[in-house]
Amino acid sequence: DGGITQSPKYLFRKEGQNVTLSCEQNLNHDAMYWYRQDPGQGLRLIYYSQIVNDFQKGDIAEGYSVSREKKESFPLTVTSAQKNPTAFYLCASSIGVANEQFFGPGTRLTVL
Amino acid sequence: GENVEQHPSTLSVQEGDSAVIKCTYSDSASNYFPWYKQELGKRPQLIIDIRSNVGEKKDQRIAVTLNKTAKHFSLHITETQPEDSAVYFCAASTTGANNLFFGTGTRLTVIP
């Protein structure tokens, strides 16, 4: 299970606050991804990055932002513009697109 | 873009019986089809994958079949055990795409 980590495991946020979720990998993977998981809805792609200093919006990018300044790091910021941020957030990385994605342990975000 | 549909959403089987989960995809250019298993509260992990140049792949009690003409692929688990209980996700991707497209998941329960 090692190689890709996320922190914190649980996060609580007040409405109107921005919060940043950490994702780090030491697998030397070029591609990294952020997914949101809600009960019964599977994995929905928020943002992805195929290479350092480049990232693209996924299906549900509104209210989120990312950066990819280093190959091993892909932090996700949940902004106050995200109307329903309570969810389980998963980060993943892969050598390339059509290859196995390795997932982090996830961060459960709760808005109070 | 690609659309992946997965059925059934829930599946209960008796221990020792077989379980089959089916997925369809829309993009005929898709050529990589992984299956992930997610146990409760844990990260998704790859259990088997298949590429479009083969029709079937087996790994002990798990097998995946691919029908490119009909654009569907299936996961077969034989001699099910209680530890097989989890949510299973199928996915599809093409070399030209930027990410995996996931199905909505199947919650498998193996009854002892």
Image (cartoon, rainbow, N blue to C red):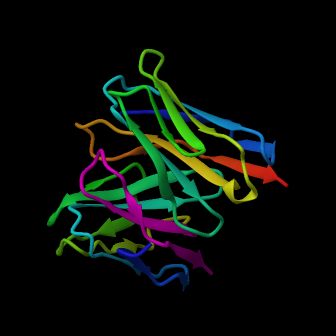
A82 lies left or right of A48: right
* Quadrant where the image shows the N terminus of chain A: bottom left
Residue drawn at the location 55% of the way across and 76% of the way down: A109
Q: Nearer the viewer, residue A81 or A12?
A: A12
| Residue at the left extreme, as displayed | A53
Q: Is residue A60 visible?
A: yes
Q: Is residue A99 magenta?
A: yes
B59 lies left or right of B83: left
A77 lies left or right of B56: left
Return the x and y of residue A21 as percentages of the image width and height: 40, 78
Return the x and y of residue B97 as percentages of the image width and height: 27, 40
Return the x and y of residue B93 as percentages of the image width and height: 35, 39
Residue drawn at the location 38% of the way across and 66% of the way down: A64
| Residue at the top extreme, as displayed | B69
Marker count (numbered): 0
Q: Nearer the viewer, residue A57 or B37?
A: B37
* Quadrant where the image shows the C terminus of chain A: bottom right
Residue drawn at the location 75% of the way across and 57% of the way down: B82
Q: Is residue A61 visible?
A: no
Q: Vertically, is A81 above or below B111?
A: below
Q: Nearer the viewer, residue B46 or A32?
A: B46
Give the magenta part as a residue range: A85-112
Return the x and y of residue B96 as percentages of the image width and height: 22, 37
Q: Is residue A91 magenta?
A: yes
| Residue at the front extreme, as displayed | B60
B8 lies left or right of B34: right
